[in-house]
Image (cartoon, rainbow, N blue to C red):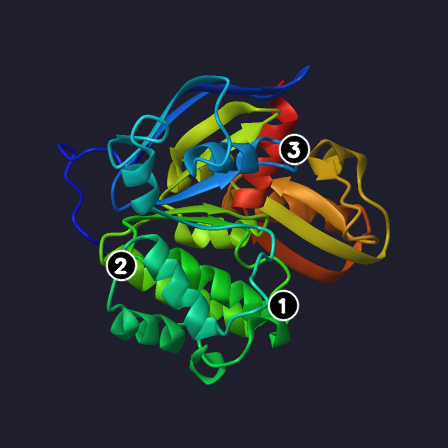
Amino acid sequence: MACKDSSLTNAIEILDVAKQYGSFQALRGVSLEIRQGEFFGLLGPNGAGKTTLISIIAGLTRASRGRVSVMGHDVVGDYRAARRALGVVPQELVFDPFFTVRETLRFTSGYYGVRRNDDWIDEILENLDLTSKANSNTRTLSGGMKRRVLVAQALVHRPPVIVLDEPTAGVDVELRQTLWNFIRRLNRDGHTIVLTTHYLEEAQELCERIAMLKQGQLVALDQTRALLRQLSGGRLLLRLASGSLPAALEPLASSDPAMPGRLSLRVDTYEDLEPILATLREGGCVIEEMELLHTDLEDVFVRIMQGSN
């Protein structure tokens, strides 16, 4: 990753941003800074305000209150420079059905005033495995290929800040791997990446810092490692061949609808394992399956969403 200098302008600055649609408050005074060169995660349940915030950053929606800048350029007062500094991959599949992939990328380059861009277009096509589709009309492409074209359009003017709004939603494993390899390379070269995703394992693996929104409010903002440390230990998953959970272990147990027939016990440290197993043996339980799961970002996300009001 490119070296970060605290004296540099932040890639994105969001100050007390609110957005109201009639009586509905989509954002409620959100403030945060994203540093240059960061791989930053913006997470939250559906309706939390993530897409509204991205729309304000991109200049597609105007905030009811507050200020946003991209690379030091106000998104309202200096919108041309702000938009040139930003590339956005939207959730929706938006494409022009009348042009080929290469034509689409050339037109997008022209929109940003970039000329003689074919070498970079070729590199993007190769890295997104689109070379064989370069002269295909976009309307003939599969959904996964159309999403690759959206990514290519966001990158074609070499923006220093790239926002990925659910970029891997509904796409295959191959595209995910291809996309993340390319995005990691761009991040190493110094590009700032902002990611929203419901695949929390992606955010945990890729993002250095994470912000979480709920009902238009910022409810968490920290280093990914620090967020994971908020919950110690993990869970011991058990399937019993015989016997039932002893009463002494019931305070550690929780139900998980995704894992019917299995018990989930909270484990704070490895030292807790032997007493738990001993209690099960003394209670006449025979273990059929056992798995120890460490705390992950999904556990933290659920805890924060349940704990915030």
Q: Which residue is painted at 33% across and 76% down in the image? A: 122
> Can the viewer see residue 156?
no
Front residue of 257/28: it is 28
Q: Mark 1 is on which residue type?
A: Gly
Where is 76 relative to 85, above or below? above
> Can the viewer see residue 136?
yes
Q: Nearer the viewer, mark 2 or mark 3?
A: 2
Q: Which residue is painted at 36% across and 31% down in the image? A: 75
Q: Quadrant of residue 301?
A: top right
Q: Position of residue 7 (x, y in %)?
A: 13, 32
Q: Tell me the crowding category of disc 1: few under 14, some 14 to 19, or many 20 or more residues within 10 angstroms, Cα based.
A: few
The secondary structure type at the circle numbered 1 is helix
Q: Position of residue 178 (x, y in %)?
A: 44, 71
Q: Nearer the viewer, mark 1 or mark 3?
A: 1
Q: Position of residue 305 (x, y in %)?
A: 61, 29
Residue positioned most to the bottom: 132
Question: Tag 3 or tag 1, which sits nearer the N-term?
Answer: 3
Mark pair 2, 1: CA separation: 28 Å
Q: Mark 3 is on which residue type?
A: Gly
Give the residue at mark 3: 47
**Residue 157 left/right relative to 94:** left
Quadrant of the snapshot with the N terminus: bottom left
Q: Mark 2 is on which residue type?
A: Val
Give the residue at mark 1: 143
Mark linked to residue 114:
2
Q: Which residue is painted at 66% across and 44% down in the image? A: 276
Mark pair 1, 3: CA separation: 24 Å
Question: Tag 1 or tag 2, which sits nearer the N-term?
Answer: 2
Mark pair 2, 3: CA separation: 36 Å
Question: Tag 3 or tag 2, which sits nearer the N-term?
Answer: 3
